[in-house]
Image (cartoon, rainbow, N blue to C red):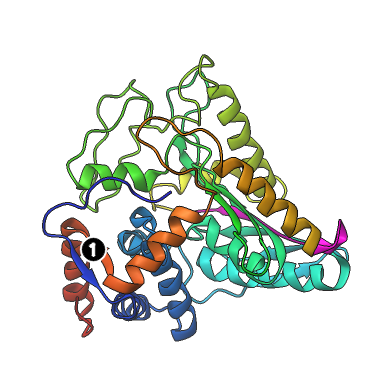
Amino acid sequence: MVENAPLPPGTKRYDPAVVESFIASALRAVGISTEDAALVAEVLVGADLRGVRSHGAARVTYFLNFLERGTINPRPNMVFTQKTDTTGLFDADNGMGIIAAGKAMDEAMKMAAKHGTGFVAVANSSHFGYAGYWAERAMRRGFIGISMSNSGGRTAPTYSSEGMLGTNPFSVGINGGEGGTNFLLDMATTTVAVGKIETALREGREIPKGWVSEAHGKPELDKKGVLKHESPLLPLGGAGTEHGGHKGYGLNLMIELLCGAVTGTPFADRIAGADGSSRPAMGHLFGAIQIQGFREPTAVHADMQETFKILRGAKKEPGQDRVYIHGEPEAIATEENRRIGIPITPKILEQLHAVAERLRINDTL
């Protein structure tokens, strides 16, 4: 979701290509290949363009932490094994999740182009960026795109005060047809993503009630700017069951199973590796589905646009003049940020300058 909070004083804007170049240089400096570094940089800058600054350049130090500790493999031997005409398992060999995600979604689309559907589960992976990037990749090719990922050690199950599960995001993208509005849902199954809390803390904002468990006091960042694990997030709907927290927990656990048990990547390993001390042990699931496997795409697109028209015509709350379709706020932000530059806040800029100095990167921001 686009960050709605005002940008803090001292925020600077940069040409997206400049930030991409910097991120790619930092990754190459710790052993990532030129091709892979370019894709990771594209995905991170893509998040900043969309106004989701929690998942953009702010994630550079996260990746470097794992890579420099050796808990992410910079040169993995990733292997895809097709199990049926429409399903397969991709072993990421503890490599970068963004690289594994790109290869896995490509395999899913190949199967879908031939057989109507394609689903690829990914084992032994790591953080794959923002879920919407991968669903959108399939959506742009005319498929229904699906992506999801687990992680660990962050979210308290209902009635627990201990961080066990991840934020476990998922995304669904449906092409709206020529000139139409696309549908692109991208959401965590927690009240907010970890990065939203980190962003708020960096920018000196109060954490709203319902974001994290109150059992361990106020959340804090560690010296690397990462949210300490002593403050577990709450599932969508919050603590307990009064506001539907058990439903958020159910969605969260569903994604854990689809990306963990299905892939053969142990949940216990995910919890152990959440702080960067051992392998991240994440799993993902990607899907591509041909729309014409159900109806003619033009008919589906027409019905989508009619649905959106009805929704946009709903009576508005006081002070509101528009009902948005999922993906529209991000599209608006992307257009603006391409024009005026992506914002890099002071704390993130400070982190990136420290990275440049430590790794002796010539590219500067």
Taking the magenta stretch, the answer to whether it contains residue 296 is yes
Of residues 72 and 166, the one drawn nearer to the viewer in this rendering? 166
Please identify the quarter of the rendering in which residue 197 is found: top left
Q: In which quarter of the image is the C terminus?
A: bottom left
Magenta-drawn segment: 280-297
Q: Where is residue 259 in the image (x, y as percent from the top left)?
A: 65, 49
Indicate left or right for 137 with 363 as reference: right
Look at 22% across and 33% down and name the residue there: 206
Indicate left or right for 148 with 162 as reference: right
Report the label total.
1
**Residue farthest to the top?**
242
Q: Is mark 1 on a helix, strand or loop?
A: strand
Q: Position of residue 98 (x, y in %)?
A: 52, 66
- Amino acid identity at mark 1: Ile
Look at 42% across and 23% down and name the residue there: 161
Of residues 109 and 168, the one drawn nearer to the viewer in this rendering? 109
Of residues 305 and 129, the one drawn nearer to the viewer in this rendering? 305
Rendered view: 257 above or below 286: above
Is residue 221 visible from the viewing direction of this image? yes
Look at 24% across and 38% down and name the residue there: 220
Indicate left or right for 226 with 75 as reference: left
Please identify the quarter of the rendering in which residue 25 is found: bottom left
Residue to which mark 1 is pinned: 344
Of residues 234 and 146, the one drawn nearer to the viewer in this rendering? 146
Please identify the quarter of the rendering in which residue 11 is found: bottom left
Is residue 279 visible from the viewing direction of this image? no
Q: Position of residue 173 (x, y in %)?
A: 63, 57
Look at 51% across and 58% down and name the residue there: 126
Q: Where is residue 150 in the image (x, y as percent from the top left)?
A: 56, 47
